[in-house]
Protein backbone atom coordinates (compact mmCIF):
# COMPACT_ATOMS: atom_id res chain seq x y z
CA UNK A 1 0.00 0.00 0.00
CA UNK A 2 1.57 3.30 -1.08
CA UNK A 3 2.01 5.86 1.64
CA UNK A 4 1.16 9.51 1.14
CA UNK A 5 1.61 12.65 3.18
CA UNK A 6 -0.08 15.93 3.81
CA UNK A 7 1.60 19.35 3.86
CA UNK A 8 1.08 21.21 7.10
CA UNK A 9 -0.06 24.83 7.12
CA UNK A 10 2.68 27.31 6.24
CA UNK A 11 3.17 28.44 9.82
CA UNK A 12 4.02 24.93 10.96
CA UNK A 13 5.95 24.10 7.80
CA UNK A 14 8.17 27.11 8.37
CA UNK A 15 9.69 25.29 11.32
CA UNK A 16 11.32 22.93 8.85
CA UNK A 17 11.98 25.46 6.13
CA UNK A 18 15.69 25.69 6.95
CA UNK A 19 16.00 22.02 6.06
CA UNK A 20 13.84 22.44 2.97
CA UNK A 21 11.52 19.68 4.17
CA UNK A 22 7.71 19.82 4.43
CA UNK A 23 6.46 18.35 7.71
CA UNK A 24 4.29 15.26 7.50
CA UNK A 25 0.83 15.29 9.07
CA UNK A 26 0.85 13.44 12.37
CA UNK A 27 -2.34 12.01 13.80
CA UNK A 28 -3.66 10.93 17.17
CA UNK A 29 -5.26 7.50 17.02
CA UNK A 30 -7.64 6.19 19.67
CA UNK A 31 -7.88 2.48 20.39
CA UNK A 32 -10.66 0.66 22.23
CA UNK A 33 -10.40 -3.00 23.26
CA UNK A 34 -12.47 -4.89 25.82
CA UNK A 35 -10.48 -8.08 26.55
CA UNK A 36 -7.24 -8.25 28.51
CA UNK A 37 -5.21 -11.33 29.44
CA UNK A 38 -5.80 -12.96 26.06
CA UNK A 39 -2.74 -13.55 23.86
CA UNK A 40 -4.59 -12.83 20.62
CA UNK A 41 -5.80 -9.46 21.87
CA UNK A 42 -2.36 -8.60 23.25
CA UNK A 43 -0.81 -9.30 19.83
CA UNK A 44 -3.55 -7.14 18.29
CA UNK A 45 -2.60 -4.21 20.55
CA UNK A 46 1.11 -4.70 19.83
CA UNK A 47 0.39 -4.76 16.08
CA UNK A 48 -1.51 -1.48 16.43
CA UNK A 49 1.42 0.09 18.24
CA UNK A 50 3.95 -1.26 15.76
CA UNK A 51 2.00 -0.09 12.71
CA UNK A 52 1.51 3.37 14.20
CA UNK A 53 5.25 3.60 14.87
CA UNK A 54 6.31 2.23 11.49
CA UNK A 55 3.98 4.57 9.60
CA UNK A 56 5.74 7.69 10.83
CA UNK A 57 2.35 9.40 10.72
CA UNK A 58 1.12 8.93 14.28
CA UNK A 59 2.15 11.35 17.01
CA UNK A 60 0.25 9.58 19.78
CA UNK A 61 -1.92 6.57 20.59
CA UNK A 62 -4.70 6.97 23.13
CA UNK A 63 -5.43 3.41 24.26
CA UNK A 64 -8.44 2.18 26.25
CA UNK A 65 -7.53 -1.46 26.91
CA UNK A 66 -9.47 -3.18 29.69
CA UNK A 67 -11.90 -5.98 30.46
CA UNK A 68 -15.36 -4.51 30.02
CA UNK A 69 -18.69 -4.91 28.23
CA UNK A 70 -20.47 -2.89 25.56
CA UNK A 71 -21.62 -0.29 28.12
CA UNK A 72 -18.06 0.20 29.31
CA UNK A 73 -16.78 0.41 25.75
CA UNK A 74 -19.44 3.00 24.92
CA UNK A 75 -17.96 5.13 27.70
CA UNK A 76 -14.41 4.50 26.46
CA UNK A 77 -15.24 5.54 22.90
CA UNK A 78 -16.91 8.72 24.10
CA UNK A 79 -13.82 9.52 26.16
CA UNK A 80 -11.71 9.11 23.02
CA UNK A 81 -14.04 11.47 21.16
CA UNK A 82 -13.66 14.04 23.96
CA UNK A 83 -9.88 13.65 23.75
CA UNK A 84 -9.99 14.89 20.16
CA UNK A 85 -8.51 11.89 18.36
CA UNK A 86 -8.38 11.82 14.56
CA UNK A 87 -9.43 8.18 14.27
CA UNK A 88 -10.68 5.37 16.50
CA UNK A 89 -9.75 1.74 15.91
CA UNK A 90 -12.07 -0.48 17.91
CA UNK A 91 -12.53 -4.18 18.56
CA UNK A 92 -16.23 -4.11 19.44
CA UNK A 93 -17.70 -6.02 22.35
CA UNK A 94 -21.05 -6.10 20.56
CA UNK A 95 -21.95 -5.44 16.90
CA UNK A 96 -24.59 -2.82 17.75
CA UNK A 97 -23.96 -1.95 21.40
CA UNK A 98 -21.58 0.95 20.73
CA UNK A 99 -23.23 2.29 17.57
CA UNK A 100 -24.39 5.50 19.27
CA UNK A 101 -20.83 6.49 20.14
CA UNK A 102 -19.48 5.45 16.74
CA UNK A 103 -22.08 7.65 15.04
CA UNK A 104 -21.12 10.53 17.32
CA UNK A 105 -17.48 10.04 16.34
CA UNK A 106 -18.04 10.02 12.59
CA UNK A 107 -20.39 13.01 12.89
CA UNK A 108 -17.40 14.92 14.28
CA UNK A 109 -15.21 13.84 11.37
CA UNK A 110 -13.40 11.11 13.29
CA UNK A 111 -12.56 8.05 11.21
CA UNK A 112 -13.84 4.83 12.81
CA UNK A 113 -12.43 1.41 11.91
CA UNK A 114 -13.66 -1.80 13.57
CA UNK A 115 -11.18 -4.67 13.56
CA UNK A 116 -11.64 -8.41 14.10
CA UNK A 117 -15.39 -8.04 14.53
CA UNK A 118 -18.03 -6.13 12.63
CA UNK A 119 -20.23 -3.28 13.80
CA UNK A 120 -23.57 -2.38 12.28
CA UNK A 121 -23.05 1.40 12.31
CA UNK A 122 -22.95 2.21 8.57
CA UNK A 123 -20.53 5.13 8.89
CA UNK A 124 -17.80 2.89 10.35
CA UNK A 125 -15.32 0.88 8.33
CA UNK A 126 -14.56 -2.76 9.11
CA UNK A 127 -11.41 -4.77 8.47
CA UNK A 128 -11.66 -8.29 9.82
CA UNK A 129 -10.58 -11.85 9.45
CA UNK A 130 -13.40 -13.73 7.73
CA UNK A 131 -14.82 -15.29 10.88
CA UNK A 132 -17.56 -17.36 9.26
CA UNK A 133 -15.09 -18.93 6.88
CA UNK A 134 -12.65 -19.48 9.77
CA UNK A 135 -15.18 -21.72 11.51
CA UNK A 136 -16.40 -23.41 8.35
CA UNK A 137 -12.92 -24.44 7.19
CA UNK A 138 -11.94 -25.91 10.55
CA UNK A 139 -15.26 -27.60 11.26
CA UNK A 140 -15.48 -29.21 7.83
CA UNK A 141 -11.94 -30.53 8.18
CA UNK A 142 -12.74 -31.92 11.64
CA UNK A 143 -15.96 -33.62 10.55
CA UNK A 144 -14.16 -35.24 7.62
CA UNK A 145 -11.31 -36.28 9.90
CA UNK A 146 -13.65 -38.22 12.22
CA UNK A 147 -15.22 -40.00 9.28
CA UNK A 148 -18.37 -37.89 9.03
CA UNK A 149 -19.96 -39.26 12.20
CA UNK A 150 -19.59 -39.04 15.96
CA UNK A 151 -19.74 -36.51 18.75
CA UNK A 152 -17.76 -33.27 18.91
CA UNK A 153 -17.10 -30.72 21.61
CA UNK A 154 -17.92 -27.19 20.44
CA UNK A 155 -15.83 -24.65 22.38
CA UNK A 156 -17.01 -21.18 21.41
CA UNK A 157 -15.69 -17.69 22.16
CA UNK A 158 -17.60 -14.96 24.00
CA UNK A 159 -21.40 -14.88 23.96
CA UNK A 160 -22.73 -11.88 22.06
CA UNK A 161 -19.46 -11.05 20.30
CA UNK A 162 -19.98 -10.72 16.56
CA UNK A 163 -16.92 -12.87 15.83
CA UNK A 164 -18.50 -15.67 17.84
CA UNK A 165 -21.85 -15.22 16.10
CA UNK A 166 -20.19 -15.29 12.68
CA UNK A 167 -18.17 -18.36 13.61
CA UNK A 168 -21.33 -20.05 14.83
CA UNK A 169 -22.82 -19.54 11.36
CA UNK A 170 -19.77 -21.12 9.77
CA UNK A 171 -19.70 -24.03 12.21
CA UNK A 172 -23.39 -24.76 11.69
CA UNK A 173 -23.01 -24.46 7.92
CA UNK A 174 -20.44 -27.24 8.07
CA UNK A 175 -22.55 -29.21 10.56
CA UNK A 176 -25.48 -29.16 8.14
CA UNK A 177 -23.31 -30.99 5.61
CA UNK A 178 -22.64 -33.83 8.10
CA UNK A 179 -25.98 -35.07 9.52
CA UNK A 180 -24.25 -37.87 11.46
CA UNK A 181 -22.04 -35.49 13.43
CA UNK A 182 -23.54 -34.33 16.71
CA UNK A 183 -22.47 -31.66 19.20
CA UNK A 184 -22.23 -33.47 22.54
CA UNK A 185 -21.08 -30.42 24.51
CA UNK A 186 -21.22 -26.68 23.74
CA UNK A 187 -19.57 -24.09 25.95
CA UNK A 188 -18.45 -20.45 25.82
CA UNK A 189 -14.79 -20.09 26.81
CA UNK A 190 -14.84 -16.30 26.81
CA UNK A 191 -11.56 -16.68 24.89
CA UNK A 192 -9.85 -17.22 28.25
CA UNK A 193 -7.17 -19.90 28.47
CA UNK A 194 -7.69 -20.95 32.09
CA UNK A 195 -11.44 -21.05 31.71
CA UNK A 196 -11.30 -23.13 28.54
CA UNK A 197 -8.89 -25.64 30.03
CA UNK A 198 -11.02 -26.15 33.12
CA UNK A 199 -14.14 -26.53 30.99
CA UNK A 200 -12.67 -29.36 28.93
CA UNK A 201 -11.24 -31.04 32.03
CA UNK A 202 -14.69 -30.92 33.65
CA UNK A 203 -16.28 -32.42 30.55
CA UNK A 204 -13.69 -35.18 30.25
CA UNK A 205 -14.45 -36.08 33.88
CA UNK A 206 -18.09 -36.80 32.98
CA UNK A 207 -17.01 -39.75 30.86
CA UNK A 208 -19.15 -38.68 27.91
CA UNK A 209 -17.57 -40.06 24.72
CA UNK A 210 -16.47 -37.62 22.02
CA UNK A 211 -14.50 -37.94 18.81
CA UNK A 212 -13.21 -34.40 18.20
CA UNK A 213 -12.89 -30.87 19.55
CA UNK A 214 -13.43 -27.59 17.70
CA UNK A 215 -12.09 -24.54 19.51
CA UNK A 216 -12.54 -20.84 18.83
CA UNK A 217 -8.82 -20.21 19.28
CA UNK A 218 -8.35 -21.55 22.82
CA UNK A 219 -6.34 -24.53 21.67
CA UNK A 220 -2.93 -25.29 23.16
CA UNK A 221 -4.38 -25.56 26.68
CA UNK A 222 -7.01 -27.98 25.36
CA UNK A 223 -4.24 -30.23 24.09
CA UNK A 224 -2.49 -29.83 27.44
CA UNK A 225 -5.70 -30.96 29.17
CA UNK A 226 -5.98 -34.05 26.98
CA UNK A 227 -2.38 -34.99 27.77
CA UNK A 228 -2.61 -34.27 31.50
CA UNK A 229 -5.88 -36.17 31.93
CA UNK A 230 -4.59 -39.08 29.81
CA UNK A 231 -7.74 -38.83 27.72
CA UNK A 232 -7.93 -40.23 24.20
CA UNK A 233 -6.10 -37.87 21.85
CA UNK A 234 -8.94 -36.89 19.52
CA UNK A 235 -8.54 -34.49 16.56
CA UNK A 236 -8.45 -30.83 17.63
CA UNK A 237 -9.07 -27.69 15.58
CA UNK A 238 -7.69 -24.37 16.76
CA UNK A 239 -6.13 -21.17 15.48
CA UNK A 240 -2.62 -20.37 14.30
CA UNK A 241 -1.39 -19.64 17.81
CA UNK A 242 2.32 -20.34 18.25
CA UNK A 243 1.80 -22.89 21.01
CA UNK A 244 -0.78 -24.90 19.10
CA UNK A 245 1.18 -24.74 15.84
CA UNK A 246 4.14 -26.17 17.73
CA UNK A 247 2.03 -28.90 19.32
CA UNK A 248 0.79 -30.04 15.91
CA UNK A 249 4.38 -31.01 15.11
CA UNK A 250 5.46 -32.30 18.51
CA UNK A 251 2.65 -33.89 20.56
CA UNK A 252 2.58 -37.64 20.06
CA UNK A 253 -0.69 -38.86 18.56
CA UNK A 254 -2.18 -35.40 18.03
CA UNK A 255 -4.00 -34.88 14.75
CA UNK A 256 -5.24 -31.37 14.25
CA UNK A 257 -5.60 -28.25 12.18
CA UNK A 258 -4.79 -24.60 12.74
CA UNK A 259 -6.95 -22.02 10.96
CA UNK A 260 -5.28 -18.65 10.47
CA UNK A 261 -6.75 -15.74 12.40
CA UNK A 262 -3.98 -13.15 12.69
CA UNK A 263 -4.05 -10.78 15.64
CA UNK A 264 -2.08 -8.50 13.35
CA UNK A 265 -5.46 -7.44 11.97
CA UNK A 266 -5.10 -4.71 14.59
CA UNK A 267 -2.14 -3.28 12.68
CA UNK A 268 -4.14 -3.50 9.47
CA UNK A 269 -6.87 -1.48 11.18
CA UNK A 270 -4.43 1.31 11.99
CA UNK A 271 -3.12 1.19 8.41
CA UNK A 272 -6.68 1.47 7.05
CA UNK A 273 -7.47 4.38 9.38
CA UNK A 274 -4.34 6.23 8.20
CA UNK A 275 -5.20 5.50 4.57
CA UNK A 276 -8.65 7.03 5.05
CA UNK A 277 -7.22 10.03 6.91
CA UNK A 278 -4.88 10.53 3.97
CA UNK A 279 -7.94 10.77 1.71
CA UNK A 280 -7.83 7.28 0.19
CA UNK A 281 -11.00 5.42 1.11
CA UNK A 282 -11.37 1.73 0.21
CA UNK A 283 -13.88 0.72 -2.44
CA UNK A 284 -15.85 -1.29 0.12
CA UNK A 285 -16.90 -0.39 3.66
CA UNK A 286 -15.98 -3.90 4.80
CA UNK A 287 -12.61 -5.52 4.07
CA UNK A 288 -12.21 -9.24 4.82
CA UNK A 289 -8.99 -11.24 5.18
CA UNK A 290 -9.58 -14.85 4.17
CA UNK A 291 -8.19 -17.65 6.36
CA UNK A 292 -6.04 -20.66 5.49
CA UNK A 293 -6.02 -24.07 7.15
CA UNK A 294 -2.80 -25.82 8.17
CA UNK A 295 -3.25 -29.45 9.20
CA UNK A 296 -0.86 -32.23 10.16
CA UNK A 297 -2.73 -35.11 8.52
CA UNK A 298 -0.98 -34.68 5.15
CA UNK A 299 2.61 -34.04 4.07
CA UNK A 300 1.60 -30.75 2.45
CA UNK A 301 -0.08 -29.62 5.66
CA UNK A 302 2.92 -30.62 7.75
CA UNK A 303 5.16 -28.55 5.49
CA UNK A 304 2.95 -25.48 5.99
CA UNK A 305 3.03 -25.95 9.76
CA UNK A 306 6.81 -26.33 9.75
CA UNK A 307 7.22 -23.14 7.71
CA UNK A 308 4.84 -21.21 9.97
CA UNK A 309 6.17 -22.38 13.35
CA UNK A 310 7.85 -19.73 15.49
CA UNK A 311 8.76 -20.95 18.98
CA UNK A 312 10.22 -17.53 19.82
CA UNK A 313 6.71 -16.07 20.10
CA UNK A 314 4.44 -16.28 23.12
CA UNK A 315 2.38 -19.53 22.88
CA UNK A 316 -0.83 -17.50 22.78
CA UNK A 317 0.30 -15.24 19.94
CA UNK A 318 -0.75 -16.13 16.39
CA UNK A 319 2.30 -16.84 14.23
CA UNK A 320 0.76 -14.66 11.50
CA UNK A 321 2.34 -11.53 12.92
CA UNK A 322 1.88 -9.53 9.73
CA UNK A 323 -0.63 -9.27 6.88
CA UNK A 324 0.71 -8.75 3.34
CA UNK A 325 -0.23 -5.40 1.77
CA UNK A 326 -1.56 -4.10 5.09
CA UNK A 327 1.09 -4.09 7.80
CA UNK A 328 4.52 -2.51 7.48
CA UNK A 329 6.40 -3.12 10.74
CA UNK A 330 9.19 -5.59 11.48
CA UNK A 331 9.00 -8.61 13.77
CA UNK A 332 11.22 -6.78 16.26
CA UNK A 333 8.76 -3.87 16.32
CA UNK A 334 5.65 -5.96 17.03
CA UNK A 335 7.45 -8.03 19.66
CA UNK A 336 8.75 -4.87 21.35
CA UNK A 337 5.13 -3.65 21.53
CA UNK A 338 6.10 0.02 21.58
CA UNK A 339 4.09 2.77 19.95
CA UNK A 340 5.04 6.35 19.09
CA UNK A 341 6.64 8.15 22.03
CA UNK A 342 7.09 4.99 24.13
Image (cartoon, helix red, strand yellow):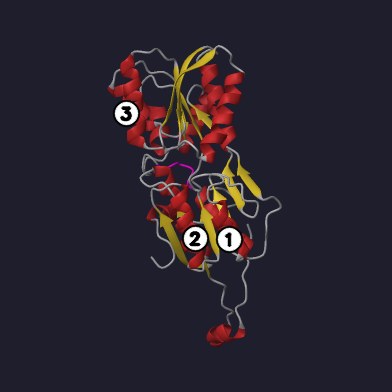
Q: Is residue 58 above or below residue 120?
A: below
Tell me if I can see residue 261 in this picture: yes
Marks 1 and 2 sit apart, C-alpha to C-alpha, by 8 Å
Going from N to C along the chain, the mark reached first, 2 or 3, is 2
Is 236 one of the magenta-colored residues? no
Q: Which mark is residue 104?
A: 1
Q: Hey, which residue is sitting farthest right in the picture?
A: 283
Tell me if I can see residue 3 in this picture: no
Residue at the spot of label 3: 198
Q: Is residue 208 above or below residue 319?
A: above
Q: Quadrant of residue 225?
A: top left
Q: Residues within 10 Å of mark 3 (few under 14, many from 20)?
A: some
Q: Is residue 127 above or below residue 273?
A: above
Q: Which residues are magenta?
A: 317-321
Cβ atoms at labels 1 and 2 below 8 Å apart:
yes
Q: Is residue 124 left or right of residue 214?
A: right
Q: Which mark is residue 205?
A: none
**Image spot of residue 279 (x, y percent):** 67, 65
Task: Find numbered disc 2 in the image and state the secondary structure of the residue it sits on.
Answer: helix
Task: Find numbered disc 1 in the image and state the secondary structure of the residue it sits on.
Answer: helix
Q: Nearer the viewer, mark 1 or mark 3?
A: 1
Residue drawn at x 46%, y 57% as measured from the top left: 75
Q: Quadrant of the C terminus?
A: bottom left
Residue at the spot of label 2: 78
Q: Is residue 170 above or below residue 85?
A: above
Marks 2 and 3 sit apart, C-alpha to C-alpha, by 36 Å
Going from N to C along the chain, the mark reached first, 1 or 2, is 2
Q: Quadrant of residue 102?
A: bottom right
Amino acid sequence: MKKSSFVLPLVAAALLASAGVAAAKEYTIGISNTVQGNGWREEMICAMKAEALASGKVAKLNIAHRNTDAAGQLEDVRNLISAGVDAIVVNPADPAGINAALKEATAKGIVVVAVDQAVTEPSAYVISNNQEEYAYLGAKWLFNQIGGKGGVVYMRGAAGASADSDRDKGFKRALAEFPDVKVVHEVFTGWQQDQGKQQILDFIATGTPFQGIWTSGIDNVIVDALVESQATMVPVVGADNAGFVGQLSSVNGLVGAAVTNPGSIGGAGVALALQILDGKKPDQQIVLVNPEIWENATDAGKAKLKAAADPSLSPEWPVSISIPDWTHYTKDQIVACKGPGE
